[in-house]
Amino acid sequence: MSEPTLLISGGRIAAAATDHAHYTLEEKERSYLGAPSGLPLVQFLFPALRKLHAEGVLTLPQLVTKACHNAAGRPSRVRPCRSPWP
């Protein structure tokens, strides 16, 4: 197995997430409609994780945990744009 594969299967990589771009704090604090545009690129992340599942590197529960539960549980590292909707 490659080193990244060992890291993700061994639990050293706890979350798998995407970010559409690296913005400054000032840009991230703008209102939703004034924020820079971008794409989350989930269309590349999920197939990569699905391939690891098909190869037996990740179980389905591990895939869901890394891509959903753990990624969502890292609010100190993720600063989403503010939504204009309550």
Image (spheres, helix red, strand yellow):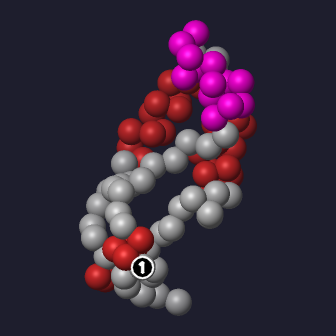
Q: On screen, 5 above or below 34?
A: above
Question: In the visual, does 46 lie left or right of 41?
Answer: right
Q: On screen, 45 above or below 23?
A: above
Magenta-highlighted residues: 1-13
Q: Which residue is mark 1?
A: 29
Question: In the visual, does 23 lie left or right of 1?
Answer: left
- Residue at 48 percent of width and 69 percent of height: 80
- Residue at 54 percent of width and 13 percent of height: 2
Q: Quadrant of residue 27?
A: bottom left
Q: Is residue 81 visible?
A: yes
Q: Position of residue 70 (x, y in %)?
A: 67, 50
Mark 1, Cα crowd under 10 Å, few <14 / some 14-19 / many 20+, is some
Q: Position of residue 38 (x, y in %)?
A: 29, 61
Q: On screen, 12 above or below 24?
A: above
How many numbered discs, if any? 1
Question: In the visual, does 51 lie left or right of 9?
Answer: left
Amino acid of disc 1? Glu
Q: Is residue 54 visible?
A: no
Q: Position of residue 55 (x, y in %)?
A: 57, 16
- Residue at 45 percent of width and 49 percent of height: 18
Q: Quadrant of residue 73?
A: bottom right
Quadrant into which the N terminus falls:
top right
